[in-house]
């Protein structure tokens, strides 16, 4: 029996098929998502699907995604939902104080990831921040494994004004392993290349969080 991994197919802009023997499934992890201060509008890259940032920050959020379907299925909350490519943001320079990227970069082909960070920096005002949550994608556990699926239960912070205090979101993400591991160190190097400074970082289980600052 063949199995389609839609997230991988969308990320690679093709329709590969994988057998169960080529897929490695990781155990579910419970991951609390900390609240964060943000003034003005927040640009959320890849804000379709579960729309976690849109649920947390609601009318502050401008959510973009390549997939109209993902945006339509995302919960209500964001001020705007716009079909847009993160490698070609249709915003003026220096118009946002905060850009978020919640478990999205793993789906961006390697050759386009630097462009995403460069575009995020361009639309950020000086001193603005880019916040990245993503997965530490390890080497495949065996040569025949081509795809890793990571399962998470995200816990929202309590007492969010107008938001989903105490709620959880259960989801999973499938991504190709690629030729080299991808994680916090990989994205920190790209961020420096794009002109960001690292303000803080945090690792929890198979996830990491980066706070980048535009100088």
Image: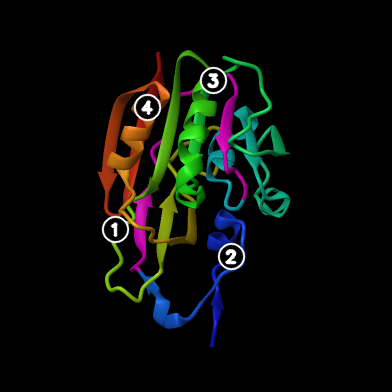
Q: CA distance from mark 4 to mark 1?
A: 23 Å
Q: Position of residue 162 (x, y in %)?
A: 59, 35
Comparing 84 with 203, the one in front is 84
Residue picked out by circle 3 = 122
N-term-proximal mark, 4 vs 1: 1
Q: CA distance from mark 1 to mark 2?
A: 20 Å
Give the prevailing secondary structure in the magenta stretch.
loop
Q: Secondary structure at mark 2?
A: helix
Q: Residues within 10 Å of mark 3 (few under 14, many from 20)?
A: many
N-term-proximal mark, 1 vs 2: 2
N-term-proximal mark, 2 vs 3: 2
Q: Is the residue 194 above or below the residue 180 in the image?
A: above
Comparing 134 with 23, the one in front is 23
Q: Position of residue 192 (x, y in %)?
A: 34, 26
Comparing 22 with 70, the one in front is 22
| Quarter of the C terminus within the rendering | top left
Q: Mark on residue 147?
A: none
Comparing labels 4 and 1, the label whose residue is closer to the camera: 4
Residue picked out by circle 2 = 6
What's drawn in magenta, residue-wise?
26-48
Q: How many numbered dots are placed on residues in this image?
A: 4
Quadrant in the picture for residue 212: top left
**Residue lying at 62% horizontally and 48% vertically, measured from the top left:** 48
Q: Secondary structure at mark 4?
A: helix
Q: Position of residue 13 (x, y in %)?
A: 61, 56
Q: Secondary structure at mark 1?
A: loop
Q: CA distance from mark 2 to mark 3?
A: 30 Å
Q: Are marks 1 and 3 in contact (CB under 8 Å)?
A: no
Q: Mark on residue 193?
A: 4
Asked if the magenta segment contains residue 178, the reply would be no
């Amino acid at each position: 029996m063949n199995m389609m991994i839609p997230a991988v197919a969308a990320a690679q802009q093709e329709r590969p098929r994988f057998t169960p023997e080529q897929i490695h499934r990781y155990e579910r992890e419970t991951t609390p998502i900390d609240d964060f201060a943000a003034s003005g509008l927040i640009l959320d890259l890849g804000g379709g699907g579960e729309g976690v940032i849109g649920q947390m920050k609601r009318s502050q959020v401008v959510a973009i995604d390549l997939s109209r379907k993902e945006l339509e299925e995302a919960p209500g909350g964001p001020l705007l939902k716009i079909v847009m490519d993160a490698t070609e943001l249709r915003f003026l320079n220096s118009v946002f104080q905060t850009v978020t990227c919640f478990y999205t970069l793993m789906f961006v082909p390697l050759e386009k990831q630097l462009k995403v960070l460069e575009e995020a920096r361009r639309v950020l005002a000086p001193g603005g921040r880019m916040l990245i949550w993503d997965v530490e994608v390890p080497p495949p556990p065996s040569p025949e494994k081509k795809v890793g699926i990571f399962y998470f239960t995200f816990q929202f912070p309590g007492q969010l004004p107008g938001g989903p205090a105490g709620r959880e979101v259960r989801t999973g993400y499938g991504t190709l392993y690629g030729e080299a591991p991808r994680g916090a160190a990989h994205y920190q190097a790209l961020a420096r290349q794009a002109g960001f400074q690292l303000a803080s970082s945090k690792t929890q289980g198979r996830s990491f969080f980066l706070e980048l600052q535009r100088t």
